[in-house]
Amino acid sequence: MHHDRTPEDKIELINILKQGTFWLIHLGCIAVIWAGFSWFAAVTCGVLYFVRMFAITGGYHRYFAHKSYKTSRWFQFVLAYLGSMSAQKGPIWWASHHRHHHKHSDLEDDIHSPRWNGIWWAHVGWVLSTQYIHARPELVKDLTRVPELRLLDRNHLVAPVSLAAMLLALGHWLAVAHPELGTNAFQLFVWGFCISTTLLYHGTFCINSFTHLWGTRRFNTTDDSRNSLVFALITLGEGWHNNHHRYPGAERQSMYWWEIDISHYCLKLLSWCGIVWDLNVHPERIYEEAHRGAAGVL
């Protein structure tokens, strides 16, 4: 007898596949034992980490979630596709849950607050749960009006799978055409996809977990957000999390020249090229508040 799957069955199946893919990518890192090392593969790993981390921080976060600057429709899609290559689902899913987080930051309804649910849940548990499989389109109506973003969000596995395929093809070609590089399809896949993506996962997730636990607080926000140079370096600038939660609309997460914010530098460069524009800045009152806080500490 044929039985149709219930919506609950479909959600459970999707979650099994999602968790399986997530852990398979982690397990793929162990294959480095057999894949070996080459400088070309290591550099590929680093470049893909950097490019995709920028797509998450400068694209998914600062653009899609917070609209902190403007860009063209074609570059908007570039950011969305590169972000989707990170295997962190599509821009609509990502931005909708992030906007919900800001609305309820470290309150009981926050989807990834270590205050309420512990560090494991805040770091990765919520991502793997059945509770947040679907996007919250009501929170991102500005994004759901764009057909190519809806298409990419529905087919969010296309980008990471295409990246894996490109790495396999490139590695095979290099092994034949340039054997002096010491790489091959298997090695480039392990370093360029498995290791780079795993590092990217935890680099991104540490903002949800660790920067609500460790660091300094310039502003007395209602949440537990904190600033950290270490996490700013890991995430190209997202570690200035207390700054961000005080004024989420600013394009830069840093506030002063000594606070390293690589995503901001990249976006500034893109603005000089006319690719992005209208980068939102912190208003003077936020700097005055920061100065008053520093004076209070002294």
Image: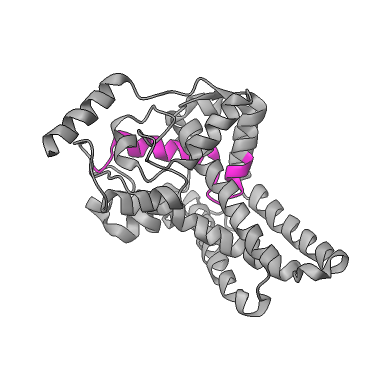
Residue 165, quarter of picture: bottom right
Residue name at image x 23 percent, y 24 percent: 288
Rendering coords of residue 256 (x, y %)? 35, 34
Q: Say if the magenta span includes residue 35.
A: no
Q: Is residue 117 visible?
A: yes
Q: Would you place residue 1 above or below residue 256 in this image?
A: below
Q: Would you place residue 141 above or below residue 46 in this image?
A: above
Residue name at image x 45 percent, y 53 percent: 234
Q: Would you place residue 161 above or below residue 222 in this image?
A: below
Q: Say if the magenta span includes residue 92.
A: yes
Q: What scheme was used to colour the molecule? A: one colour
Residue 25, quarter of picture: bottom right
With 288 as the anchor, is 264 left or right in this view?
right
Rendering coords of residue 123 (x, y %)? 37, 56
Image quadrant containing the N terminus: bottom right
Residue name at image x 41 percent, y 55 percent: 129
Query: Which residues, given as a range, are shown in magenta?
Result: 81-107
Magenta span: helix, strand or loop, mainly? Answer: helix
Labels in figure, total: 0
